[in-house]
Image: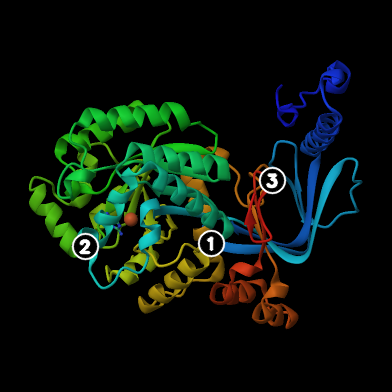
Amino acid sequence: MTDPGLIRYDGSNIANNFHWSCLSYDAVVKVSRSITRIKSEMESKSKRKIVYGHVVDVKRDKHGTAFFKEFRQGELEIGLDHKISYCGLRRTDCQSEVCDVYDFKDSLLMPSFSDIHLHFPQYEMIGSHGEDLLGWLNRYTFPIEMKYSDLKYAQSKAKQFVGDLVSVGTTSAAIYSSSHFESTNALLDACNSGGLRAVVGQVAMNRHAPDALLTKDLHDYEKHFSELFRKWHVDDGRLKLAVTPRFAPTCSDDLLNLCGQLLKGNPGAFLQTHFAETQAEIDWVQSLFPKSRDYLDVYETYDLCGVNSILGHGIHVTKSEMERLNQTRTAIAHCPSSNLFLGSGVMNWKQMREQNIRFALSTDIGAGTSICMWDIMGDAYKSQKLMGHTLTAADLFAASSIDGAEILFPEYQSFGFDVGARADFQVLNARKNRFLEERLGRNESIDEVIFGLIWSWTQSMVDAVFIDGDIRFESGKCK
Ligand code: GUN
Ligand code: FE
């Protein structure tokens, strides 16, 4: 007999159509409980959601300046389409027959994070000591990435990785997998079950790395990309594929050419790679591609720049490269934690803004030392301060949330708590943070409070994380 627990409520009256006589008493009880549960889930899915709390949204004005908008006794409404349908002051109580109510009291409701550059297999090697970029890749990174040829291993790591991202409030990300098809598929699978919005790519390399990580036959990368694209990529959905040549030094002209073709031939696909992270890397690129006028020219030659392209770092860039990044609308993933850790340099935030180049913050795990965007904001603030540039809390928060989401999912059009935005947000309990509670108690401005939060955030403060209006993390656990 079919397991009664597997019966699904499809809107028809199962109880009337079902042949109860074929089941034991226990099974009947189980079926009826299961129907009640599924019915209430269905009813719940057909209700709007009302979420109460201290709403803190982040926006940009017409000059691009970021600012917070808060409603201390605030309310978010999530429509049946999983999008924000109201953000503002708390209204009169909604009747529970027509909506589900979540009352988070005075906890902060804030847009969730977007991390536009990190490496799945490197999560386990955060804090590998003491090398610059090229030494660090050879000594630590490549050996770790080889372990991801083992599917079982990759599967267990992927689930943990996605769970940890969501638990710190990150709900969208652009992720490098390893060079393996199976581990990339496992990562996409984990993103899918964990609800994470993700742009994912299998790393492509065919030189200057250990044999076990190289794509020997270019047709294999093409085949793997196409298969993953067909299986997972959904326009206007949660998952997308990225063509992912690691960086110019580990790719031949043929491989870069193939990447350009894959990008062009698969509308909606992304391109992610590394660019101008250290001077030694730039010198190496110049010697490997002597005909190129600069580093960016290598990627431009193979049509790898554009609105769906994300280049990691962009620290040591020329004036001309800046102009071309702007012209092609290519985005930069700014990774201050990684840049400090490897001693790569500091990206020029002020100039990037002035040149109107699209960029957002990212962890770059595992050269970056934290998976949590609050820590990355702290590293961005300190490193920009050394450059003589003082960032505001709103600058930092926007670059960690709405800016990244807009780069990865421009088709959504609305972000943060704008009406029509996907209901992705985090709930932070100020009462679990004495430091923050005191600041709120002193009636400090929301900018001061959020700036303080950058240095005092703890995991235990995260009451809940919502994606598409559903709770995906609550009370220390992923759902
Ligand atoms: N450049 C090429 N590969 C990598 C990588 O894995 N991490 C960083 N930070 N830079 C790179
Ligand atoms: Fe990286």
Residue pointed to by mark 2: 139
User: Mark 1, residues whose alpha carbon is within 10 Å: few (<14), some, or many (≥20)?
Assistant: few
Among the two numbered marks 1 and 3 on one chain, the one whose residue lies closer to the N terminus: 1
Residue at 19% across, 31% down: 217
Residue 333 position by quadrant: bottom left
Q: Quadrant of the rendered structure where residue 231 is?
A: top left
The residue indicated by pointer 1 is: 65
Q: Nearer the viewer, mark 1 or mark 3?
A: 3
Question: Residue 109 at what x, y percent from top left?
Answer: 69, 60
Task: Return the disc, 2 or 3, that comes first in the chain's sequence.
Answer: 2
Residue 60 visible in the picture = no
In this view, 472 is above or below 306? below
Its colouring scheme is rainbow
- Viewer-side residue, 8 vs 137: 8
x and y percentages locating residue 407 in the rendered image? 46, 47
Residue on which disc 3 sits: 469
Give ligand 2's quarter of the image: bottom left
Label 1 CB less than 8 angstroms from ligand 2: no
**Mark 2: which secondary structure?**
helix
Q: In which quarter of the image is the N terminus?
A: top right
Tell me which label, 2 or 1, sits earlier in the chain.
1
Q: Residue at x 73, y 83 (%)?
A: 442
Circles 1, 3 touching at the beta carbon (< 8 Å): no
Which structural element holds mark 1? loop
